[in-house]
Image: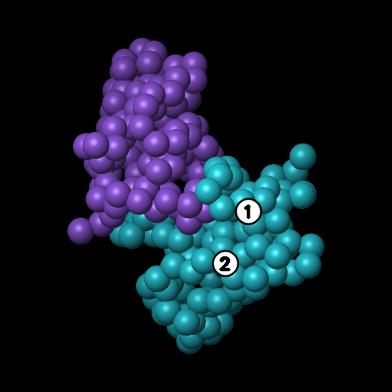
Chain colours: A purple, B cyan
């Protein structure tokens, strides 16, 4: 079993929809939680970072971490076609060696 | 500020050969990490270098090695290439290494390696 499990999708939604992306993990030592976005032929770029449990909001994006359930989520409000990409959750105990989920491919249809 | 650059962007090799990939971190960044991305295994950590020393290593065979130079540039080498080594190899740099604090990792575009 992988340390980080992520529903690979693919996920297809209409423009304006709310998107929910999720990851579960098994390693209790993880305390840094990140969401990356990766466009085709590009490297991942950091979207959100959360330390320990809690919520964090940045514009249309909200990240939630529930350490008691070992579950993290990313919500995208008012999704746009430009949000179409692969979304990767990543976690770390030390914030240096990242353990990634397999990624969810999202398509937002105009 | 220029981002992380990786060269070459694309590479085709045959089984048994060796390959060297290069990474130039963002100016001022001293930590460089390498990751392998494949459709089957996703993104997996290879190793991290800071101050020319390997600080962390992932679960990869000894055929995968790396080094870091005094200007923080890094190279990774894969010897005796296997078909399964075909992947996107990503380099990420971060500003500094302080245990227990968060250092954002900035990824380069990757080197696409195909092994025939």
At which x and y percent is residue B49? 62, 65
On the question of residue B32 being in view, the answer is: yes
| A68 is higher (above) or lower (below) than A94 | above
Left or right: B30, with B11 as reference point: right
- Disc 2 is placed on an element classified as strand
The subunit letter for the residue under badge 1 reads B
Question: What residue occupies the far front of the structure in this picture?
Answer: B100
Determine which residue is flagged by label 1: B97
Q: Could you say which disc has been placed on residue B3 in the image?
A: none
| B42 is higher (above) or lower (below) than B53 | above
Q: Quadrant of residue A110?
A: top left
At which x and y percent is residue B94? 63, 49
At which x and y percent is residue B66? 60, 73
Q: CA distance from mark 2 to mark 1?
A: 10 Å
Figure quadrant of the C terminus of chain B: bottom left
Query: What residue lies at 44% left-to-right and 42% top-to-bottom?
Result: A32
- Disc 1 is placed on an element classified as loop
Query: What residue lies at 53% left-to-right and 48% top-to-bottom?
Result: B100
Query: What residue lies at 53% left-to-right and 39% top-to-bottom?
Result: A45
Figure quadrant of the N terminus of chain B: top right
**Other-residue count near label 2 (Cα within 10 Å), few / some / many at <14 / 14–19 / ≥20:** some
Q: Nearer the viewer, residue A94 or A47?
A: A94
Left or right: A73, with B85 as reference point: left
Marks 2/1 same chain: yes
The subunit letter for the residue under badge 2 reads B
Whether label 2 touches label 1, CB < 8 Å: yes
On the question of residue A42 being in view, the answer is: no
**Other-residue count near label 1 (Cα within 10 Å), few / some / many at <14 / 14–19 / ≥20:** some
Query: What residue lies at 24% left-to-right and 37% top-to-bottom?
Result: A68
Q: Nearer the viewer, residue B18 or A101?
A: A101
At which x and y percent is residue A57? 45, 20
Determine which residue is flagged by label 2: B55
């Amino acid at each position: 079993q992988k340390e980080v499990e992520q529903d690979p999708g693919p996920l297809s939604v209409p423009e304006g929809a709310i998107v929910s992306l999720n990851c579960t993990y098994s390693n209790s030592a993880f305390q840094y939680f990140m969401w990356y976005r990766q466009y085709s032929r590009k490297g991942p770029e950091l979207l959100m970072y959360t330390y320990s449990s809690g919520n964090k909001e940045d514009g249309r994006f909200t990240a939630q971490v529930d350490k008691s359930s070992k579950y993290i989520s990313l919500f995208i409000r008012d999704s746009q076609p430009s949000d179409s990409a692969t979304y990767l959750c990543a976690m770390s105990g030390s914030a240096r060696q990242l353990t990634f989920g397999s990624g969810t491919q999202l398509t937002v249809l105009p | 500020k220029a981002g992380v650059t990786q060269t070459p962007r694309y590479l085709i090799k045959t089984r048994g050969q060796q390959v060297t990939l290069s990474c130039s971190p963002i100016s001022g960044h001293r930590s460089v990490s390498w990751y392998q991305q494949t459709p089957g295994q996703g993104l997996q950590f290879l190793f991290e270098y800071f101050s020319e020393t390997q600080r962390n290593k992932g679960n990869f065979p000894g055929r995968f090695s790396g080094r870091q130079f005094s200007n923080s540039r890094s190279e990774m080498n894969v010897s005796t290439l296997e078909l399964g080594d075909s992947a996107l190899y990503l380099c990420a740099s971060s500003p500094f290494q302080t245990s227990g604090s968060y250092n954002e990792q900035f990824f380069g575009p990757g080197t696409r390696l195909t092994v025939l």
